Image: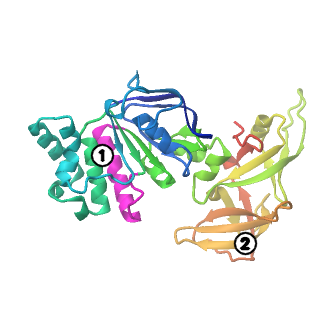
């Protein structure tokens, strides 16, 4: 298998910068997921690695070898397309065997490899069928088999499960991850589905408008978002993000043991959040911030909470395993939009729209972002 490295890769389509100065290293046998909304550049990056797109700037390396000038066939990577791209007139056996026949492999070798792949994918009984007689999940396995039979250095997969129904996608996620572990295959998987990314990836590469936002394990990108975009994109419901201003601060004298204090006043609300000394030390001269808190890190109660805040319930979504409670904090004076805080609670917690409840933030789970750069305050 292979290591893949991108150095300052840029790809433009006219005036549109699809990929902007991309630097990334993918390790041998790693399962990496490119994640982001439609149009963020993830598929273009994948196609550039495969050789289907030529970068305007930068270099791409596979196993230490620069492959910019190599054709897709000479890069020894296998591409699994979103729409399977099976030959309708060929049987499953011939579809899987096609890459080997194209390089004139021996008939015995083709037979051996196709049989091996069919056993791994559990499609032995389908080898004589045509694609028109297969389900979506079965066609997906055949497309994977055609890629696997070549024994490439890396697998590149462009939203291969987007056409499957919800239950089959769950099954295929588990199966594909198991398969990748068994083969020890370096794999890049493109998706816009964060559940797929969180459940399958060793590392997630989050992209937005052609730029790399953050690279990390699923736990890192969820618990330690580096930008406002990552904080919003990861999680369902998304992280609450509310602008605020540092209202007051007690200067710390050099010879004093006093603890500095600062209060972040959330804009157009009555909510004030006291910042710890550790957080204050990171702020520098900043005073306009964005406070981020995930719904599961908000404490709610029908009884008063010490240092908590009282507010009105705007809406309750009872989802069975959890309740999502929208808490009305105020109204944006400029736009007139409601300022809503979303909290996730145990289903046993009862609250009705219009009711007053108390809430507070878990201070250890609060994220602060620079309002102007939208990057986390480290």
Q: Which residue is mark 2?
A: 314
- Looking at the picture, how far across and down is residue 97, in whole percent? 19, 44
Query: Along the horizontal axis of the image, is 359 left or right of 80?
Result: right
- Looking at the picture, how far across and down is residue 317, in whole percent? 61, 72
Q: Residue at x 25, y 63 (%)?
A: 132
Residues in magenta, as a range: 160-186
Q: Which residue is mark 1?
A: 179
- Looking at the picture, how far across and down is residue 327, in whole percent? 72, 67
Query: Along the horizontal axis of the image, is 148 left or right of 119?
Result: right
Label 2 CA crowd tier, 10 Å (few <14, some 14–19, many 20+): some
In the orientation shown, which residue stands out farthest toward the top?
65
Q: Nearer the viewer, residue 263 or 167?
A: 167
Kindly state the secondary structure of the residue where label 1 is placed. helix
Label whose residue precedes the other's in the sequence (1 or 2)? 1
Q: Nearer the viewer, residue 175 or 23?
A: 23
Q: Residue at x 48, y 44 (%)?
A: 43
Label 1 CA crowd tier, 10 Å (few <14, some 14–19, many 20+): some
In the orientation shown, which residue stands out farthest toward the left?
108
Residue 301's disc number: none
């Amino acid at each position: 298998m292979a290591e893949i490295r991108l150095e300052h890769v840029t790809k433009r389509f006219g005036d549109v910068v699809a990929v902007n100065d991309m630097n990334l290293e993918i390790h041998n046998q790693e399962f990496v997921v490119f994640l982001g909304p439609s149009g963020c550049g993830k598929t273009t990056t994948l196609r550039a690695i495969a050789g289907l797109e030529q970068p305007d700037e930068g270099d791409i390396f596979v196993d230490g070898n620069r492959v910019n000038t190599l054709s897709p066939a000479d890069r020894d990577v296998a591409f699994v397309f979103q729409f399977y791209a099976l030959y309708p007139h060929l049987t499953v056996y011939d579809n899987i065997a096609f890459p080997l026949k194209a390089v004139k492999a021996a008939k015995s070798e083709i037979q051996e490899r196709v049989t091996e792949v069919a056993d791994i994918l559990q499609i032995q009984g389908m080898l004589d069928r045509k694609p028109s007689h297969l389900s979506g999940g079965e066609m997906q396995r055949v497309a994977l088999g055609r890629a696997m039979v070549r024994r490439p250095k890396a697998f590149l997969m462009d939203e291969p499960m987007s056409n499957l129904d919800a239950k089959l996608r769950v099954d295929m996620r588990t199966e594909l991850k198991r398969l990748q572990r068994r083969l020890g295959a370096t794999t890049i998987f493109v998706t816009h589905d964060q559940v797929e990314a969180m459940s399958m990836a060793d590392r997630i590469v989050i992209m937005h408008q052609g730029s790399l936002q953050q690279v990390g394990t699923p736990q890192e990108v969820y618990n330690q978002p580096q930008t406002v975009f990552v904080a919003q994109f990861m999680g369902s419901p998304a992280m609450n993000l509310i602008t605020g201003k540092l209202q007051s601060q007690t200067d710390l004298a050099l010879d004093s043991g006093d603890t500095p204090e600062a209060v972040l006043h959330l804009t157009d609300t009555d909510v004030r959040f006291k910042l710890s000394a550790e957080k204050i030390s990171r702020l520098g001269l900043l005073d306009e911030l964005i406070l981020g808190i995930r719904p599961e890190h908000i404490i709610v109660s029908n009884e008063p909470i010490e240092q908590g805040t009282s507010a009105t319930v705007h809406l309750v979504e009872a989802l069975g395993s959890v309740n999502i409670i929208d808490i009305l904090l105020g109204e944006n004076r400029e736009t007139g939009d409601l300022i809503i805080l979303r909290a996730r609670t145990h289903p046993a917690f009862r609250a009705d729209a219009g009711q007053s409840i108390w809430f507070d933030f878990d201070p250890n789970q609060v994220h602060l972002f620079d309002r102007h750069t939208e990057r986390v305050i480290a």
